[in-house]
Image (cartoon, rainbow, N blue to C red):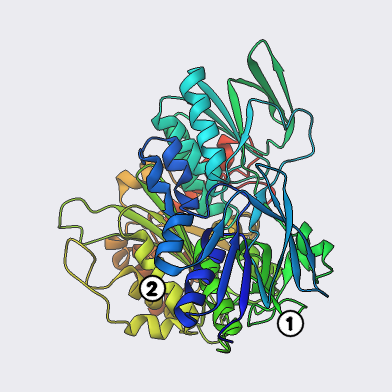
Amino acid sequence: MHGMKVVIIGGVAGGATAAARLRRLNEHAEIVVLERSGYVSYANCGLPYYVGGVIQNKNALTLQTPQSFKARFNIDVRVHSEAVAIDRAQKQVRVRETLTGREYTEGYDALILSPGARAAVPPVEGANGARVFTLRTVEDTFRIAEFLQKSKAARAVIIGGGFVGLEMAENLVERGIRVTLCEGAAQVLPQLDADMACFLHARLRAAGIDLRLGAKVLGFAEENGALTVRTEKGAFSADFALLAVGVVPDTALAAAAGLELGARGALLVDGHMRTSDKDIYAVGDAVLVKNAVTGEAGAFALAGPANRQGRIAADNVCGIPSVYRGAQGSSVLKLFEMTAAFTGLSERAAKAAGIAYDRAVLFSPNHATYYPGAQNMTLKVLFRPENGEILGAQAVGYAGTEKRIDVLACAIRAKMTAADLQALDLCYAPPYSSAKDPVNMAGYVIENVRAGCKQFHWNDLPAVYADPNAVLLDVRTAAEFAAGHFAGALHIPVDELRGRMGELDKSKKLYVNCQSGLRSYIACRMLAGEGFDCYNFSGGYRFYAAVAQDAAAEGVPCHPCGVPVSE
C-alpha cells in the first residue's frame, strides 16, 4: 500500500477532498489529479456572487492551486489535462493536454472518478449562440463577467428557476440589469412544494423581475446585437441569456470504459463509493447514492455530499471500510434578504416514493416578538402519521430560517419523531428564538394532529365547498375578516366564541380558520370540548392567501375561494 499509485480524474469538491484525504492517510502514495479546466479546487457555489460583484477578488474563488497542493500535500495536480480514455485491463488512463494536444498514458493502482456534471443545454435552435451563457465553471464565470463589463448589457433572460437561476437573478438585479426569469414548470425551486415556492415568486416579483412560469424555452435568435428568446409564454428581447436548466452527469468517459450506469446516465456505486470495477471509485455529482429517507437511489448535485464521498472513497482506497450513509438533500438558498431551506422529502418526493405522510404548516416569528426586529417564517414539516417520524421539512423566512432546517435535518437522520422534537433542548434568548422554538412548536402541532386534532389544507377547500354539511368559521378579528376571508364564512372572533356557540349547528362539520392556525386551533379545542366536529385550517388564511394569490397572478382558473381548479 505504501508505494501505491492513485489517479483522480476531476477536482473541485469530490476529487480535491479525496486527494487531500489520501495524503493524510498515506504519506508515500503517488497521487495524480487530472483536471481538464484551469482550476482544480474552486468555490463552485460562489460563482454567481462573483458575477454580482459581491465577491470581488478573482483569487478568492480558488481554494487550492496546483502549486499549493504540491507544497502542502505533495500531490501532482495537472490542470488543462483531460482524461480521454480508461483502459481497465491495463489499468491505464489516456490523458490529453488541452493546451498542446499532446497525449500520454498514466498507470494506476486505484482510480477515483470525480467528473461532476455539466450544465444541461436544451436541444433548441440558437442554444449555443455567443449571447447564451451557462454557469458551471470558473471559466464560465469570467466569460459572463467580461461580457457584462464590455457590453454594458441592460436586459437578461434567465432560463430556469433552480439554485443557479435564482442566485443569478438576484445578482444581476443587484448590478442594475433588468431580468426576465422563465421557468418551464409551474414553480421555481422544484425541491420545494408549490405552496412554499409561492413566497419566492412574490419576492422575485417585488424585486422587479418578470417571472414567467410554464415558460419552457423554444429557441434563441440573435439579430443586430440583440437576442430574442422564444418560450411557451411568448418571446422576450434581451442583451444576453443564461441557461440554468439543471445539470447532466458527465459520465461519457466512464460509459466508454464499460462501467455500470443507472438513471440519467449517473454512475452506479456501492456504499464504499466503488463502481462496478473494484479498483475504480466515483464521487460527486456524477454518481447515484442512497436517499437517506427513502432508501432509493438518487442524484444529489451538492457540495456537502461530494466532499463526504471524496473522503469515503479515499478511506476505502487505503483499506478503511468507510460507508456513505446516504444524502437527504439539505439545502439553503439566499434570495435577496429572504432565506429558503429544505431537507428530506417534499410532498412530491413522498408521493413518488409511495410513502404515506401528513404535514403541518406553522407560521412562526424567528425570535421573541417583544425583541425588536422579529421576522416571519413559514415552516412546513412532513411526518409519518403512524408514529410521527419526521420525513422532511421546508422553511421560507429571514434570519434563523436555515438553523431550524439544520436541526430538522439532524432529526430526520436520527429517525426522530414529533415527540422527540417537543423534547429538544434548543438555544433561547430573545434576540435569537422563543422559549418554544419553531422546531419544538412543529413537534407540538404534529402530536396534536396525531392525538386527534383534525386539520384541513388549502387544497381541501373545493371539497369543503362541495360538502352541504360543511360550515366555514373564521375566528379572526373584525379588521382581519374585513381585509379578506373565505366566501360564505361565518365570523365569530375567538375571544367571543364561548358566549356565541349557540349560533353554531352541532350537526354540521366546522372548518375553522384564523390567520396562522393558532387561534383556530384554540377555537377547535373549545368547540371539541362542547361536542362539535371541527377541523383546523393548516397554515392559516395567510398561507392560503400566498398560495391563491400566486395562482391567480399566473392566470390559472380558480374556484370562488381562490384555489386553482386543478387542485
Which quarter of the figure is the N terminus placed in?
bottom right
Q: Nearer the viewer, residue 537 or 477?
A: 537
Quarter where residue 509 is shown: bottom right
Label 2 sits on what residue type? Answer: Val
Percent position of residue 530, x then y: 39, 77
Horizontally, residue 554 falls left or right of residue 103, namely left
Horizontally, residue 399 falls left or right of residue 242, namely left
Secondary structure at numbered mark 2: helix
Number of on-image labels: 2
Q: Which mark is residue 22?
A: none
Question: Can residue 407 be spotted in the picture?
Answer: yes
Q: Nearer the viewer, residue 307 or 438?
A: 307
73 w.r.t. 278: above or below: above
Mark 1 and mark 2 lie on one chain; the one further toward the N terminus is 1
Percent position of residue 354, x then y: 71, 74
Label 1 sits on what residue type? Answer: Lys
Q: Nearer the viewer, residue 379 or 224?
A: 224
User: Which tag is nearer the camera, tag 1 or tag 2?
Assistant: 1
Quarter where residue 131 is shown: top right
Q: Which mark is residue 278?
A: 1
Q: Which mark is residue 407?
A: 2
68 w.r.t. 178: above or below: below
Give the residue at x 48% y 82%: 25
103 w.r.t. 298: above or below: above
Question: Can residue 449 be spotted in the picture?
Answer: no
Quarter where residue 437 is shown: bottom left
Percent position of residue 359, x then y: 52, 69
Percent position of residue 283, x then y: 62, 69
Q: Nearer the viewer, residue 356 or 192?
A: 192
Secondary structure at numbered mark 1: loop
Residues marked 1 and 2 touching at CB (< 8 Å): no
Give the residue at x 63% y 82%: 272
